[in-house]
Image (tube, helix red, strand yellow):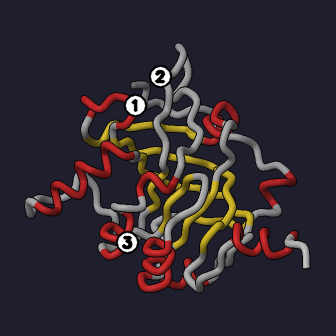
């Protein structure tokens, strides 16, 4: 897996209109974000999908340390494809957040502050976001080739045998996302449905 830095994307008018988000996140930083906010994330994201989440929870159940400290961090639900020669990473689009619903509250209780995926989260996750002051961000599905341009460095962290589902440390610049669920109970999907609901 290449670990060299790639050229960072230039700051565009679109990214300038987004709220900057720089993990690790504090409670105060999370409190400034509301459902519907467009953000540009710069810093570190960790990747983990279903298989990796199962391993993380199994480690906790066994009293073992996690391969990275989740406190203040953001997990991106992504299984990137292998990079082509000269690239840092392959296509890196989000997977469905609901697939991690069974695991998310446990990690949020440990201090995880953000998750990036697509689609709805269940009631338990949304309640955990309020209790532990965290955020669920959405990224555009089907745009993995575009999103990978915002990833400038990749490092393998754990569970390499899981292949695309291994835990990786990504360094990102102006990674575009939108706040779907905030720490106040705000829900962009619910608000959108209400807005277009016929009386």
Question: What residue would you read off at disc 3?
Answer: 108
Secondary structure of the residue carrying numbered label 2: loop
Answer with mark 2 or mark 1, whichever residue precedes in sequence: 2
Question: What residue would you read off at disc 2?
Answer: 82
Task: Compute the Cα span from label 2 to label 1.
Answer: 8 Å
Q: Nearer the viewer, mark 2 or mark 1?
A: 1
Question: What residue would you read off at disc 1?
Answer: 164
- Where residue 130 sits: x, y (%)? 49, 83
| Contact check, label 2 and label 3, Cβ < 8 Å | no
Determine whether 122 is above or below 131 in the image: above
Answer with mark 2 or mark 3, whichever residue precedes in sequence: 2
Answer with mark 3 or mark 1, whichever residue precedes in sequence: 3
Q: Is residue 195 found left or right of 111 in the rendered image?
A: right
Q: Image point 83% across, 54% down: which residue?
A: 14
In this view of the protein, which residue sits in the foreground, 121 or 81? 121
Q: Quadrant of the N terminus?
A: top left
Secondary structure of the residue carrying numbered label 1: helix
- Within 10 angstroms of label 2, few (less than 14), some, or many (20 or more) residues? some
| Contact check, label 2 and label 1, Cβ < 8 Å | yes
In this view of the protein, which residue sits in the foreground, 22 or 103? 103
- Within 10 angstroms of label 1, few (less than 14), some, or many (20 or more) residues? some
């Amino acid at each position: 897996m290449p670990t060299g830095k790639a050229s960072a994307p230039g700051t565009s008018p679109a990214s300038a209109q987004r709220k900057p988000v720089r993990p690790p996140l504090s409670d105060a930083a999370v409190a400034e974000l509301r459902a519907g906010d467009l953000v540009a994330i710069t810093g570190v994201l960790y990747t983990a999908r279903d298989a990796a989440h199962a391993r993380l929870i199994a480690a906790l159940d066994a009293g073992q340390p996690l391969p990275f400290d989740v406190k203040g961090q953001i997990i991106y639900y992504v299984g990137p494809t292998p990079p082509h020669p000269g690239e840092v990473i392959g296509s890196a689009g989000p997977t469905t957040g609901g697939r991690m619903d069974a695991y998310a509250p446990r990690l949020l209780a440990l201090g995880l502050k953000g998750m990036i995926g697509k689609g709805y989260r269940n009631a338990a996750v949304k309640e955990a976001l309020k209790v532990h002051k965290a955020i669920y961000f959405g990224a555009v599905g089907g745009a993995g080739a575009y999103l990978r341009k915002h990833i400038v460095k990749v490092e393998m962290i754990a569970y390499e045998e899981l292949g695309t589902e291994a835990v990786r440390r990504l360094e990102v610049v102006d990674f575009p996302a939108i706040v779907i669920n905030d720490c106040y109970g705000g829900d962009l999907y619910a608000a959108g449905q209400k807005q277009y609901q016929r009386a």
